Every structure is written in structure tokens, then in C-alpha cells.
Image (tube, rainbow, N blue to C red):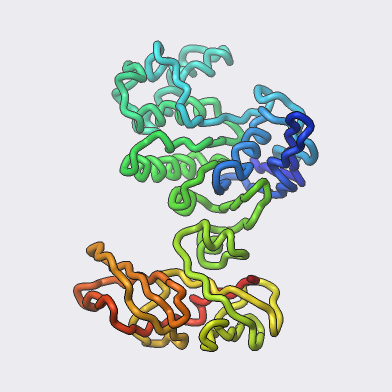
Amino acid sequence: MSLILKNVRKIFTSYGVETVAVDDFDQSIEKGQLVTLLGPSGCGKTTTLRIIAGFEIPTNGRVLLDEKDVTNLPPNRRNISMVFQSYALFPHLTVEENIAFGLKLKRLDRTQMKRKMREMTDLVGLKGLEKRRPDQLSGGQQQRVALARSLVMEPSVLLFDEPLSNLDAKLRESMRLEIRRIQQEVNITSVYVTHDQVEAMSISDIIVVMNEGKVMQIGSPFDIYARPQNSFVADFIGRVNFVEGVVDSVDGDTVTVSVRSTGERIIGKKGSEISTGEEVKVVLRPESLSDRREDRINTLNGKVLKFVFLGSNVEYELELPDGKRINAVTFNPIERKLPVVGKDTELYFSRESAWVIKA
């Protein structure tokens, strides 16, 4: 089932002061897609999720499920399920009783209920744990119960409100892969809220980056990371270097930038509508910088200030002639040797790695 948010806006008023929590959110989510709302705390992602669920009514705009307007319908009439951050399991009920809770409210017969519970416990990997209570389960197993309880209701849309934030790092990694596997297997339209960039990148079809209620960019994980439309997105997703300059020339999607501090020229790809003479930033990811030229046409000169050896790669910091510091990552240090602190170094990068956006 498709989900459409049309120009959704939400304003909260407190003591006469208006706060725009969501500002003109407009997005169509196709059946089976997993769309992640990503951003810092207070950016409006959870409010957007609550509007979809029916816990909040938008000030303006509409919410449509398969072209049916559900904007003013209460949560229990939307056929939408939510997986909460706190799991929200009944502590006195067993795994199968927690999963079956909603089915009992629907008054399904016992045979149907058992069949659905068996399907769900198999799907989420809880087979053999049906008689245990929540306090006898690990955090990951409790999250699987919460997921099964939502899926067993066969919702049109499944919502996730930071479901992995209470788990440790290793368990988070395995659970996000499980959530993605299950979501794809049942082919359910899903909206996922998180502030964790790695989580969003690893499970999403589409990422919506938000800040202060506004949508900053919508795109695939690759586009969000490699082709950010503005400085906020570039800085929020992963690590990044910004090199400031002025546009010398524009030829199609190729831009030549004169670096403000050194006068060096960088040839890159146009990330937004820019023109000659305009101030811009060149977005450079640390891993796109290499100490080997090969087919790379751009150069930055700097002095190695420090480095960290991490086994498979080396992360190090350089100081450019103007005093600006940038980060670089090199891989396979066994072959390429470790950098030398205090040594002048040239780093090379391709035009595809130099993404030019408005300053």
C-alpha cells in the first residue's frame, strides 16, 4: 500500500509562541519501500511519524493511504502498526501471548490465531521461545517480539520509532539487518525514524534528511552520502572536508573552482545550480583522498599532523598551507606504509569525488 504526505505542516503553540515542528513535508512512499526519516534531535522526524500514525493531526496538509484521505482518522482506523523504542511488551504475558494480543481483540478463532503466531515466530526467529516472558529474553529477542506483534496484525504500513536505540552496538548491527530482511520478505511499506546515520544508510531504500522541521534532502543512501545538496546534509552524513572557493568556469556538470586561500584549482562535479564568480564549497569525503595519483587529476598539499592506525586503514589529519585542517583515510597500510608526522604530503582526488555546492 502506498503512503503519501502532501504538504504536511505541524505547528505547536505554547504560551502564545508558535513552533513549526514540521514544515511542508511532501513525499510519496511506494508499496514495499522502507523510507527512513533521519536527523538530529528536535528536527521533526518523530512528529512526522506520529502524524502518519494518527497520534498528531497536522496543522495543514494531508495523509493518504492508497489515495484514501486518513488525515483526521484516529490511529485504530488507519491499519498502521508501530514498533516502539521501549518495546512496550506486557511483562506478565508470554511471547506468544504478547504476539497474539491484537488478534484476540480482533476475535480471530483459535486455529487462525495459532497459525499466524507460528508464522510470526518462524519469521522473526523466536521459534522455541514462545512460552518465555519478556524478562527471560535478551533485548534483541524482546525487539523481535515487538516486531512480530506489529506484523501479525497485517498492517498496511509499519512504523519504527528508533527501535534499536536501547541495544548495544553489536546487537544493533545484527538487528537492523534482521529488520531489513523481514521488511523485504513481507514486502511491507515502512517508515523508520533514527538519528543514526549508519543505521539509515544500511537499511533504507530512501532517506529523508530533516533539520529544524524542514526536509533538507530526499534520496537514496548513495545520493545522500555522495551527492549532498547542501552543507548540512554533507556534514551530518559521515565525515567530510569542505574546501571553500570561487567558481572559475562551468561546463555542463563540470565545475572549475579556484581555492580561496591558495589559488589552486579543483575540477569537480556540479551539485547545485551555480554560476561563474559564485562562492562555493567543494565536498570531499576523507576516503576519496589518496596519496597515489593514478588517474586522479586534483591535488591538495599539506603536512601530516597526526594519524591513527586502525588495522585495515589509517585515518590521518593534514594541515593545508592556509592552516585549514582536513582528514584523509588510506586503506591497506601493510602495502602502502604508514604516514610520517610532520612530512609534507600530496593528496590526489578525482573530479567525481569533488562535489561542488553553494557556500
Q: Residue 348, position in %: x, y?
A: 41, 83
Q: Quadrant of residue 239?
A: bottom left
The answer, for residue 251, to whether it is visible in the render is: no
Q: Quadrant of residue 106?
A: top right
Q: Judge by depth and name the residue closer to the eye, 281 or 159.
A: 281
The answer, for residue 294, to whether it is visible in the render is: yes
Quadrant, the C terminus: bottom right
Q: Residue 19, position in %: x, y?
A: 72, 39
Q: Quadrant of residue 8?
A: top right
Q: Residue at x 75, y 42 (%)?
A: 9
Left or right position of 304 against 299: left
Q: Residue 157, position in %: x, y?
A: 60, 36
Left or right position of 108 against 147: right
Quadrant, the N terminus: top right
Q: Residue at x 47, y 22 (%)?
A: 88
Q: Residue furthest front?
A: 323
Left or right position of 196 against 18: left
Q: Judge by depth and name the residue closer to the eye, 61 or 28.
A: 61
Q: Judge by depth and name the residue closer to the eye, 336 or 302.
A: 302
Q: Is residue 214 above or below residue 350?
A: above
Q: How many labels, in total?
A: 0
Q: Judge by depth and name the residue closer to the eye, 77 or 72.
A: 72
Q: Residue at x 69, y 84 (%)?
A: 277
Q: Residue 229, position in %: x, y?
A: 62, 65
Q: Residue at x 27, y 76 (%)?
A: 341
Q: Residue furthest left?
A: 334
